[in-house]
Image (cartoon, coloured by chain):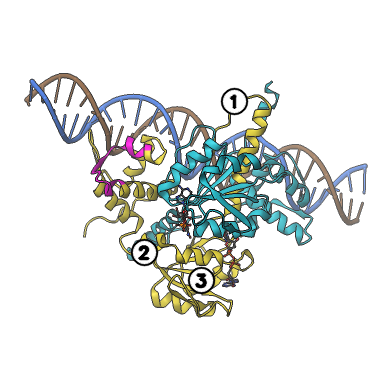
Chain colours: A yellow, B cyan, C brown, D blue
Amino acid sequence: MDGQRTRRRIPEATVARLPVYLRILSEQFDDGVTNMSSEQLADFAGLNAAKVRKDLSYLGSYGTRGVGYEVEYLVYQIRRELGLTHDWPVVIVGAGNLGQALAGYGGFGDRGFPVGGIVDVDESKVGSLVGGVRVRHLDEVAQVVQSRGISIGVIATPGAAAQEVADALVAAGVTSLLNFAPTVINVPHGISVRKVDLAVELQILSYYEQRRASAKAATLHAVPGAR
Amino acid sequence: MDGQRTRRRIPEATVARLPVYLRILSEQFDDGVTNMSSEQLADFAGLNAAKVRKDLSYLGSYGTRGVGYEVEYLVYQIRRELGLTHDWPVVIVGAGNLGQALAGYGGFGDRGFPVGGIVDVDESKVGSLVGGVRVRHLDEVAQVVQSRGISIGVIATPGAAAQEVADALVAAGVTSLLNFAPTVINVPHGISVRKVDLAVELQILSYYEQRRASAKAATLHAVPGAR
DNA sequence: CCGGCTTTGTGAAAACATGCACGAGCGCCC
DNA sequence: GGGCGCTCGTGCATGTTTTCACAAAGCCGG
Ligand SMILES: NC(=O)c1ccc[n+]([C@@H]2O[C@H](COP(=O)([O-])OP(=O)(O)OC[C@H]3O[C@@H](n4cnc5c(N)ncnc54)[C@H](O)[C@@H]3O)[C@@H](O)[C@H]2O)c1
Ligand SMILES: NC(=O)c1ccc[n+]([C@@H]2O[C@H](COP(=O)([O-])OP(=O)(O)OC[C@H]3O[C@@H](n4cnc5c(N)ncnc54)[C@H](O)[C@@H]3O)[C@@H](O)[C@H]2O)c1
């Protein structure tokens, strides 16, 4: 077995862009494109070519000078690096509006993240079918997680319950959390957390809107948009 | 007159944290807390105190040495800086699963972003009521936007329609977009875009999961989680 | 086999963000 | 009213990310 030893550490910013490249490349591949330059990929991703090349260079030297990258091979390499060579079932906690929308959403399982379980505390929801999966009680979350080998948990409960749910998930053995509740959660070292917060996004937009408005009032040129 | 030109430019990273502080402070205020130190706020936000102080210093010097920050006043200042002193109605495009969940979601209007309109192209949806708002046709989006003075658009259509929808929104006068479709959209200079992409988040988690797994295989110590 | 054209891969510089450390200012208590 | 303890505000060092720019590498046509 060869030198997998130098497990290259990929910068966080790059990790966050790899999924974007992956989607673009997969789509292009489906459209019959077999080869792309960093310039073309950058255009699709709304970035500049140097950044794309540097990002891809963390995966290894998979391009061909004067030609570009072979789309299919690059898709394979990114998938491998992101750990998408196998499915990662997820458990959704909270079978409310959002939890149901997520469970019913095809693009989830489609992309390698099938819903392996849904749990809630509301007895009127436990036992019902959501997105084809039967809702279980939060108390059984450890069993759900362990029986399916789940390592990713999705928190779709009200903010007030988020910390408690996070604790339960971690205790059950989950090591990555995607938090939709508008609350900062604390987890032990070694657990990954990502947060999706609608209000934060809107407030950031509001900041730039407000800024544009005051810039206009001062008869100045436009402020560059955020990304 | 570039007097206002000296409008303190706040670093993007700070702008993204202000909403978090705002939520924490508002909550604490409701709980009767009148004063907080940077250390306390940092704990709630999962950051360190120096960062909090530096972030807040962009707003001005509103703390009191030896004491901390007055919660109520800080809430006011952050709201002012983020442009949250008035409502920003939004228009939602796409009345599907996600669009309906968003429209029905109270935490939206609650926080100063009332749903000012919903549009779709599906004739079977146009005319129906979603979250108390009547769905109109995409063709009428300019009228909706202008009659309500909307500057923020939310894209909740399939990816294939996202660019077309973005173009229509921009043409209608919208200057900020929140994109839930898994597609990079191109907009003219001066328009802000934020993207929320579930698949990207899960794939980032997958990367760290995979990395943890191979670190374990190599009998090495754990990899720090992402934030 | 060569020279021209293209595009990668990557050092080095610049820009940005974080974390540390400490002086300065404030409140409180004696 | 002076000293003490606390916490802010910020200069500076460190770390990370982006951008630039160019040599090296591959392809192609002759
Ligand atoms: N609905 C949206 O469009 C939307 C958008 C963005 C963010 N959010 C956030 O997502 C979260 C869920 O929103 P929602 O609209 O689905 O709310 P909801 O009230 O419809 O659903 C919440 C669900 O969580 C369950 N729950 C409560 N405490 C629980 C616990 N301790 N353990 C397990 N389950 C528990 C409830 O029984 C309920 O089924 C909220 O934090 C909200 O802020 C929602
Ligand atoms: N459902 C989820 O939980 C979820 C989660 C994350 C992301 N998303 C993303 O959000 C988007 C919407 O998802 P969904 O589940 O609501 O899909 P959906 O199919 O339920 O709804 C899409 C809606 O958009 C409308 N539409 C299509 N083309 C349009 C156009 N050109 N103009 C206006 N409206 C148009 C359709 O008529 C439909 O009502 C997708 O891009 C999806 O990837 C959904």
Image mark for residue B68: none
Subunit bearing disc 3: A
Residue at numbered disc 2: B213
Amino acid under disc 2: Ala
Q: Per the image, is A34 magenta?
A: yes
- For the residues labelled 1 and 3, the Cα–Cα distance comes to 49 Å
Residue B177, picture quadrant:
top right
Amino acid under disc 1: His
Q: Position of residue A209 (x, y in %)?
A: 62, 38
Mark 1 or 3: the one toward you: 1
Q: Is residue B226 above or below residue A68?
A: below
Q: Is residue A187 above or below residue D8?
A: below
- In terms of secondary structure, where does tag 3 sit? helix
Which of the two residues, A104 or B32, is positioned nearer the viewer here? A104
Residue at numbered disc 3: A169
Residue at numbered disc 1: A221
Subunit bearing disc 2: B
Residue occupying image coordinates x 43% and y 47% = B161
Which of the two residues, A58 or C30, is positioned nearer the viewer here? A58
Q: Which corner quadrant of the figure contains ligand 1?
A: bottom right
